[in-house]
Image: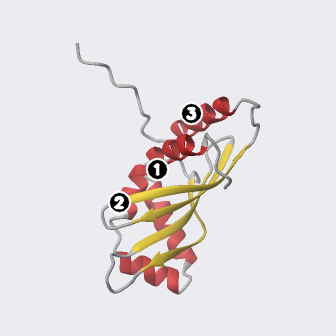
Amino acid sequence: MKKCEYSEQREKIVAEAIRPVATELRLIDAADFIALLRFESHGSLADLVSSAAELYFLPGTVNFGIGGNYSLDWDTEPEITLDLELKPDGVTIYAQLALGKDSAGLEINHIAFQSPSNNPDENTAFLARSLNAAKFVKSYPTALAS
C-alpha cells in the first residue's frame, strides 16, 4: 500500500482491534505454522485463523488471506507472517500479520471502503466504528477515577 499520512493511524486501529486474535494465534506452535505454510495447507491455516477470530469477531470478519511466509534461521527466533482479510461492514482490509516469539505486528496492504468519503478523517473514523461493530465484546471508554 502506498503510505500516506493516515496509514499509521489506520494500522494502529486495525492492530488494536485484532490484538486478541493475534494473541490466540501466538498460542500455536511456530513449527505447526511453518509446516502448514511449507506444504501449502491453506485450508488448515484458514481454519486456525477462523477459530482464533470466532472468539472475538462476528463470523466472516477475519479471514486467512492468500498465503503467508515464515522466517527461520539457525541463529534467530522464528517469525510467521499470515495474510489476512478483514471484512467488517462497509470496508475490506488486506493486511499481513507478523507473529514473533514475544510480539505481533500488522502491516496493511490495502483498504477498500465500500462508500468512501472525500474526507480521509471520516474514512478513518468509519474504519474504527466498523471494526468495533464487528466485535463480540465492544470497547467502551473507561471513566476517569474521581
Labels 3 & 1 near each other (Cβ < 8 A): no
x and y percent of residue 97 in the render? Answer: 49, 61
The residues bearing labels 2 and 3 have C-alpha atoms spaced at a distance of 26 Å
Give neighbour class at mark 1: few <14, some 14-19, many 20+ (Cα, 10 Å): some
Q: What is the secondary structure assignment of the residue under circle 3?
A: helix
Residue 103 lies in what quarter of the image?
A: bottom left
Comparing labels 1 and 2, the label whose residue is closer to the camera: 2
Give neighbour class at mark 3: few <14, some 14-19, many 20+ (Cα, 10 Å): some
**Residue pictured at 46% horizontal, 67% vertical:** 48
Residue type at tag 1? Ile
- Identify residue for label 3: 129
- Identify residue for label 1: 18
**Residue pictured at 69% horizontal, 41% vertical:** 90
In front of the other: 77 or 114: 77
Labels 2 & 3 near each other (Cβ < 8 A): no
Residue type at tag 2? Ser
Residue 98, relative to residue 59: is it above or below?
below
The label shown at residue 103 is: 2
x and y percent of residue 17 in the render? Answer: 47, 45
Q: What is the secondary structure assignment of the residue under circle 2?
A: loop
* Label 3 or label 1, whichever comes before in sequence order: 1
* Label 2 or label 3, whichever comes before in sequence order: 2
In front of the other: 93 or 103: 103
The residues bearing labels 1 and 2 have C-alpha atoms spaced at a distance of 13 Å
x and y percent of residue 82 in the render? Answer: 52, 67
Q: What is the secondary structure assignment of the residue under circle 1?
A: helix
**Residue pictured at 37% horizontal, 81% vertical:** 31
**105 displayed left or right of 60:** left
Residue 75, relative to residue 104: is it above or below?
below
The residues bearing labels 3 and 1 have C-alpha atoms spaced at a distance of 14 Å
Image quarter in which the N terminus is found: bottom right
Image quarter in which the C terminus is found: top left
